[in-house]
Amino acid sequence: MVSTAGIIIIGDEILSGRTKDTNINWIATELNNIGVRLIEARIISDDSETIIETVKTFTKKFTYVFSCGGIGPTHDDITTDSVASAFNQKLVKDPEAMRRLKIHYEGTNIEFNEARQKMAIIPTNSILIDNPVSAAPGYKIENLFVFAGVPKIMQGMFSTILYDLVGGIKLKSKTVSSNVGEGLIAKDLEQIEKKFKTVKIGSYPYFKPGNFGTSIVLRSEYESLLNQASQAVLSAIIKLGGIGKIVEENELDERSF
């Protein structure tokens, strides 16, 4: 059985455009490397009802769920309260989290005040996730991993739980780059995908001065079928009078023409 995943990005600053999200792309790459299929990613506001409903929906649908954001010391960091409500758990000030934070703030000019102690509060029945960057831990509750939103901190947290995830066969991919328009090749791609049922095909038009074309991305667990489907796409492009080439995943530059 293939493990699946969902990502929840929490933060008004993302939705307003003030902050650019990079966490989805980074997590998606890491999951793909171990064969976990990312099925859905959603960006939501700092609204308790929205967080609760999204957490409930995602944790029922996917093997693993990763949330990013809203676990800091400020008043608008409401992720933990909302997660506790979603799982019908109480909030507790975790002794181990407090110990780590006290050590972190010792010898600094920063007061370990009540607001910062909020970062040690987690739902009951949670397991701490190490934070090698800034000490304040994340936590895991059932199949939900709760991370900080700052990319470097999130990445440090994720690295500590990576080997707890059970993946499968990594999806392999090839890109067929062409100077043929998407509308012209669409019918051929539909027929090729029907023939190679385990190969997913996506087409992505590109435009640049004096030139346009389509990058066709093929993905599959099965390398032999991926190769056959890629050749079929290339043949279809040539029959249409176009120029195309197959680009390997590790040398990808899809806008070649």
Image (cartoon, rainbow, N blue to C red):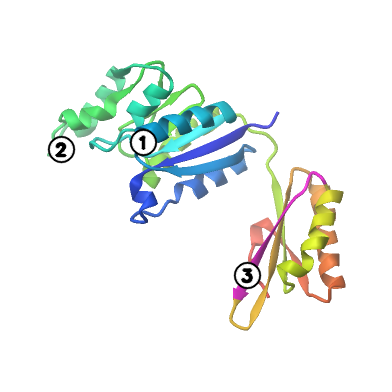
Instruction: Give the number of the mark in front: 3 or 1.
Output: 3
Residue under label 2: 108
Q: Position of residue 200 (x, y in %)?
A: 74, 49
Q: Tell me what residue is drawn at x 24 percent, y 28 percent.
A: 118
Give the residue number, with chain letter if any, for mark 1: 132
Q: CA distance from mark 2 to mark 3?
A: 52 Å
Amino acid type at circle 1 is: Pro
Pick the quarter of the image with the C terminus: bottom right
Residue at (59, 81) in percent of width and height? 209
Q: Nearer the viewer, mark 2 or mark 3?
A: 3
Within 10 angstroms of label 3, few (less than 14), some, or many (20 or more) residues?
some
Q: Residue 4: x, y in percent?
A: 61, 34
Report if residue 206 lies within the magenta region. yes
Locate residue 43 relative to residue 232 in the image: left or right.
left
Q: Which residues are magenta?
A: 197-207
The residue that label 3 is drawn on is: 206
- Using the numbered discs, state the Cα–Cα distance from disc 2 to disc 1 in whole angstroms: 18 Å
Quarter of the figure with residue 88: top left
Could you tell me which secondary element the residue under label 3 belongs to?
strand
